[in-house]
């Protein structure tokens, strides 16, 4: 459970923003989306490899 302590004089918008950041870090939404449709391990591995190759190419191009 995520707990956000609202400080004195803090606006609701700032508190909501902090809540959203904490919620995003937990990865609950990402896990929920991944569980909606089953994906075989081979397909998951393939997408991870493709993503790693993409990131590696982006690092090479920026240097």
Image (cartoon, rainbow, N blue to C red):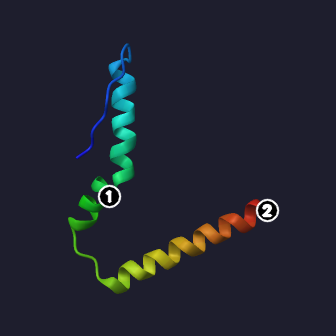
Q: Secondary structure at mark 2?
A: loop
Quadrant containing the C terminus in the rendered view: bottom right
Label 2 crowd bin: few (<14), some (14–19), many (20+), radius 10 Å: few
Circles 2 and 1: CB atoms closer than 8 Å: no
Q: Nearer the viewer, residue 28 or 5?
A: 5
Residue 20 spot, x, y in % from top left: 35, 39
Residue 7 spot, x, y in % from top left: 36, 21
Q: Secondary structure at mark 1?
A: helix
Q: Residue furthest bottom?
A: 42
Vertical placement of residue 23 versus 55, above or below = above
Residue at (46, 75) in percent of width and height: 48
Q: Nearer the viewer, residue 1 or 39?
A: 1
Residue 47 spot, x, y in % from top left: 44, 76
Marker disc for residue 30: 1
Spatial CA distance of label 2 from label 1 is: 31 Å
Q: Nearer the viewer, residue 24 or 41?
A: 24
Residue at (59, 70) in percent of width and height: 54
Marker disc for residue 14: none
Residue 2: quarter of image: top left
Residue at (38, 13) in percent of width and height: 9
Is residue 48 rendered to the left or right of residue 15?
right
Q: Residue furthest right?
A: 63
Marker disc for residue 63: 2
């Amino acid at each position: 459970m995520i707990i956000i302590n609202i400080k004195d004089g803090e606006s609701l918008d700032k508190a909501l923003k902090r809540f959203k950041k904490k919620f995003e870090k937990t990865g609950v939404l990402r896990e929920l989306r991944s569980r909606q449709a089953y994906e075989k391990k081979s397909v998951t591995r393939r997408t991870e490899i493709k993503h790693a190759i993409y990131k590696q190419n982006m690092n090479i191009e920026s240097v």
